[in-house]
Image (cartoon, grey):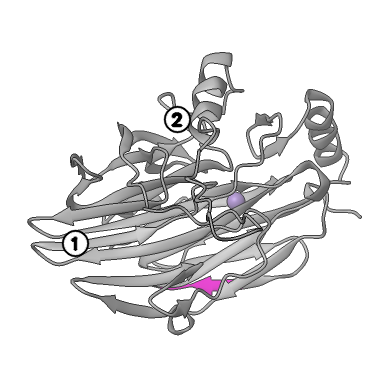
Amino acid sequence: MRDLNRREWLLASGVALPAAWLVGCRSSESSVTREPTPALASTERAARLVLPSEPTTDGAGVRLRRALGNRSLSMLDPFLMLDEFNSDRPGDYIAGFPDHPHRGFETVTYMIHGAMEHRDSLGNHGRLGPGSVQWMTAGRGIIHSEMPKQEQGLMWGFQLWVNLPGRLKMTRPRYQDIEPTRVPEVTLGSATVRVVAGQAGGATGPVRDIVTQPQMFDVRLASGGSFRRELPSSHSAFLYVFEGALEVGVPGRSVARGELAVLGEGDAVSTRSSGGARYLLLSGTPLREPVARRGPFVMNTQEELERAFQDYRSGRLTQG
Ligand code: MN
């Protein structure tokens, strides 16, 4: 993958750095002390940008669609990449992602259908089936393979990349492997929500202790359904539609299957669907640090990036 160019960096930063958000501060005449009060009314986030995912090939020849980390939007701090792989043609996925390294960020695999096997240089391995999640903090380095565990049928899932702050880029690798039954599914009006990370409807997602405090929801709307979700105003947020079509924000903007919507300033997002839809909703705290990225490494500086390649070539990538 290319490095960020300046325009893309500014775009991504601009989305993540909303203009100062002025919250109404109510002063009480009868009170001696003046305390800041919460926002008097929540503000709807709009679909600030709607971008189609782009077909591409990665790994040993896996055909996928890249919704983030592409030519249109190279990142949305702290999110670096979102890929959707969705095919029932084995030739599109069977080659998988043989041994490759990562350093400096987190990779998240979320499966809808089919199965992927994960195996790394430290001896960890696991099988990800439908509805399961793997949140892997690569930290200072892992070398792993991600291979389909099927020779036919539908393979459908996502890979999300989330950045780590400089102080944690060289942390010890950590896995959160989550079985489908551990992901709570809550019904909120006409929406069914799988809570992967964060909280919704009284349920707390199983992914814990991630520095960027992400919220990750898999939202299914019935025909004519709607869903409104509060998201911290300090978070960068986006959604990606993978079934049907949505109206996002007030006034609504259409987001079709295969499109990513970057959400603007505000503290809530409203979605509606006339014909039904399913989408991923993600938010997280932007890191606001320089990003030097190339291929499987995401660091703060070019020197650190060069070091990562050197460490990989010399076999030191995964050594503490
Ligand atoms: Mn990988």
Where is residue 311 shown, x and y percent of the image? 86, 39
Tell me where the magenta segment starts and ends, as one range.
Answer: 126-130
Tell me: residue 112, above or below residue 69: below
The residue that mark 1 highlights is: 226
Where is 107 relative to 54, above or below?
below
- The answer to if 118 sits in the magenta stretch is no
Which sits earlier in the primary sequence, circle 2 or circle 1? Answer: 2
Return the residue nearer the eye: 313 or 69.
69
Classify residue 176 by image quadrant: bottom right
Crowd class of label 1 (few under 14; some 14 to 19; many from 20; radius 10 Å):
many
Q: Is residue 209 above or below residue 312?
A: below
Q: In this rendering, would 104 be left or right of 227?
A: right
Residue 152 seen: no
Q: Main secondary structure of the magenta part?
A: strand
Residue drawn at point x = 55 percent, y = 60 percent: 30
Is there CB contact under 8 Å for labels 2 and 1?
no
Give the secondary structure at mark 1: strand
Residue that label 2 marks? 70
Q: Helix, strand or loop at disc 2?
A: loop
- Relative horizontal placement of residue 287, taking residue 197 as reference (left or right): right
For the residue pair 117 and 227, the one nearer the viewer reads as 227
Any mark on residue 130, and which? none
Q: Is residue 106 left or right of residue 17?
A: right
